[in-house]
Amino acid sequence: MDVIQQLNAHGFTALLVGGCIRDALCGMQPKDFDVATDAPLDEVKRIFRRSRIVGRRFPIAHVRYGRNLIEVSTFRQSVSENIEHDAQGMILRDKAYGTLQEDAFRRDFSINALYFDPNNNEIIDYVGGLEDLAAGEVKLIGDPTVRLAEDPVRILRAVRFANKLGFSLDPRIIELFEDSARRLTAIPPARLFDEFLKMFLTGYGENIWQHIRHTGIARVLFPTCNPNSHLISAAMRNTDERIKNGLSVTPGFLVAVLLWEDFRARSAEQRLNDEDPAFATLRNQQQTIAIPRRFGSFAKETWMTQDRLIKRNPRTISRLIQHKRFRAGFDFLCLRAKSETDLAESAQWWTTFQEQDEATQQSMIAALPKPQRKRRRRSKRRSPE
Ligand code: ATP
Ligand code: MG
């Protein structure tokens, strides 16, 4: 409201738009607030000291307000020679300013193109968004073929909103799943990482995974994932539950889960002098989704705990508990144990172990079978004679 009032005070129109209106009308708590205005971005930047302009394709202003980040965008023109497309119809740049009504038609889905004017408590709807919201349908504004070609990430957003709100997808969007999936290969991997976070780390990951796992979308995003993996489904469910309970989640854990089968296959194939299988697994995934280094390391470290947790060498257990990925590794093992029955015993052992006092822990360790020492044979060198 303050951001809007300040823009008004400088003579500009400003309205709330997008996800916050959509979510509020669905009875959900908006997670952030987007503002649309007729103020050009350099004016926005001048008015708010703590702001900066971000985005190359669709520049917007990030305005910091206390702890919050408000995304302010200037009304865009709907049809314009100023919009640059590539040969496939994908928008490369869109910087032409327009009117409020034009801005509405540039937005992706009708339910995302609702504006709220706080000065008269009015909802403004040019595209039938209220009707689609009431009907529970995710519909693109305009021709779905054109709009998905302009920006193939919209197919991911469509799936995400449908699952988050419990809405159905317009059948014309479903028909374009495979075509849009192929177009996703043209999207910069860094943008797909952002979208990956929104899809799988905001509490609706399991349903989204079920929705896409047998489609080209999953094959493009995660080329090595097994669509029938029990581990992936279980981890998605677990992540959603943690989010609902206010527990912390890290993308690194899901990266470890999603790439586990590929890592195992590469480890099994590894021959002398081959590159590190963890590195090769991560590098292969980076071609579509740019995984920041810290999350890649997290995944690798989690994978490295698995054998140690299963083998339970009594002499190194105390070090293993101190390992910075012990917790993640243990959680990972428990998820695996749900479908790999031979892991149930070690997962149970670790669960019990952590519930005990120190003396009991020591006796549990003492009761473990000693690992078979590799016998160092000090055979006498035979003399040549
Ligand atoms: P959430 O913030 O919950 O993910 P949102 O709808 O607010 O949902 P944002 O990415 O914050 O999503 O975008 C704000 C608004 O900007 C959207 O509601 C939509 O109107 C518009 N928008 C965002 N991305 C696109 C896109 N790829 N194409 C067209 N319009 C978009
Ligand atoms: Mg938003």
Image (cartoon, grey):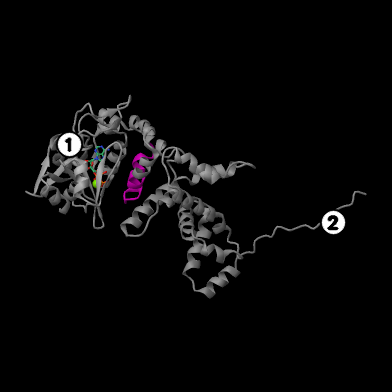
Residue 277 at x, y percent in the picture = 55, 44
- Asked if residue 206 shows in the view, the reply is no
Asked if marks 1 and 2 touch (Cβ < 8 Å), the reply is: no
Q: Is mark 1 within 8 Å of ligand 1?
A: no
Give me the disc on residue 103: 1
* Badge 1 or badge 2: first in the primary sequence: 1
Q: Residues within 10 Å of mark 1 (few under 14, many from 20)?
A: many
Res. 167 image quadrant: top left
Query: Per the image, is 320 magenta?
Result: no
Give me the disc on residue 37: none
Q: Residues within 10 Å of mark 2 (few under 14, many from 20)?
A: few
Does residue 379 appear left or right of residue 98 in this picture? right
Q: Residue furthest right?
A: 385
Mark whose residue sits in front, 1 or 2? 1
Does residue 139 appear left or right of residue 380 in this picture? left
Q: Residue at x 34, y 41 (%)?
A: 211
Q: Residue furthest top?
A: 87
The residue that disc 2 covers is 380
Mark 1 vs mark 2, CA separation in Å:
86 Å
Does residue 303 appear left or right of residue 187 in this picture? right
Residue 198 at x, y percent in the picture = 32, 46
Task: State the extent of the magenta-drawn residues as a range.
Answer: 196-214
Residue 385 at x, y percent in the picture = 93, 49
